[in-house]
Image (cartoon, rainbow, N blue to C red):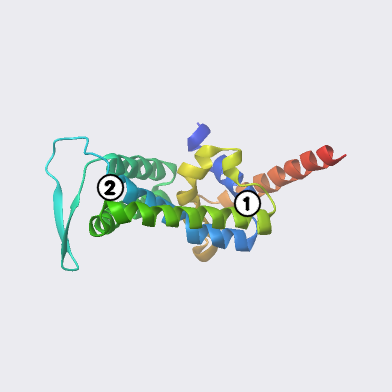
């Protein structure tokens, strides 16, 4: 039985791919997507804890920091489980990166403190989002996917950026034929979009 909705990897990656065909735009997203995720976790570090559980205290680079069981942890858990469910190999790597981001962002947030951390997060988020809009407007010449599908922008993007790297650099496919199937769907999506643009012009 084929997967549907959020778990249809072919359909969702093809949708993402149709908005990211220009090499410069792809590079911009590779550079900026994960910092958006990381900085969001820095911000969420300061959310109150959910559970009355003992925190884990770590010692790193001569400094102590604490992992908090709060919204940042839940955010990381949901993303990790979801990515692993999409594809065991690439998804597990993405899940590991999510956990690494959670731990590292906790350290950064602990060192910065709230009064500095929110300012750093704001700057990172603005730079990264503006960079991606420039990538779409100047190089891709197509509005970003978030205008059509918010889930793609906020849930799928980190995993798809990683999958794009694994595919381009190592030739990785979740299963044989995945790339060719997705590429055909990407081309169909672009053709449909170009046709709708032409109809609007005429």
Q: Image height check: is 162 above or below 9?
A: below
Q: Can residue 177 be seen in this snapshot?
A: no
Mark number for residue 84?
Answer: none
Instruction: State left or right for residue 180 relative to residue 65.
Output: right
Instruction: State left or right for residue 68 relative to residue 35.
Output: left
Residue linked to disc 1: 180
Q: Image height check: is 24 above or below 161?
A: below
Q: Are marks 1 and 2 in contact (CB under 8 Å)?
A: no
Q: Image height check: is 14 above or below 33?
A: above
- Residue 27: x and y in percent read 56, 62
Residue closer to the observer: 159 or 38: 38
Q: Secondary structure at mark 1?
A: helix
- Residue 42: x and y in percent read 32, 51
Mark 2 neighbour density, 10 Å: few (under 14) some (14–19) many (20 or more) = many
Q: Image height check: is 176 above or below 30?
A: above
What's the residue at 14%, 53% (across, down)?
57
Residue closer to the observer: 17 or 133: 133
């Amino acid at each position: 039985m084929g997967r549907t909705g959020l778990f249809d990897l072919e359909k969702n990656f093809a949708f993402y791919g149709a908005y990211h065909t220009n090499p410069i735009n792809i590079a911009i997203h590779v550079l900026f997507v994960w910092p958006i995720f990381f900085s969001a976790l820095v911000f969420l570090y300061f959310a109150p804890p959910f559970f009355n559980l003992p925190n884990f205290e770590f010692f790193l680079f001569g400094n102590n920091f604490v992992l908090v069981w709060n919204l940042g942890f839940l955010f990381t858990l949901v993303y990790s489980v979801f990515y692993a469910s999409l594809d065991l190999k690439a998804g597990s790597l993405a899940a590991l990166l999510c956990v690494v981001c959670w731990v590292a962002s906790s350290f950064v947030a602990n060192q910065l403190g709230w009064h500095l951390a929110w300012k750093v997060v704001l700057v990172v988020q603005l730079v990264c989002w503006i960079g991606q809009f420039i990538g779409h407007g100047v190089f891709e010449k197509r509005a970003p996917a978030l205008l059509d599908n918010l889930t793609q922008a906020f849930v799928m993007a980190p995993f798809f950026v990683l999958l794009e790297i694994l595919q381009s650099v190592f030739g990785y496919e979740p299963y044989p034929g995945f790339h060719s199937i997705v590429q055909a769907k990407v081309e169909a999506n672009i053709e449909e979009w170009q046709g709708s643009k032409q109809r609007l012009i005429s």
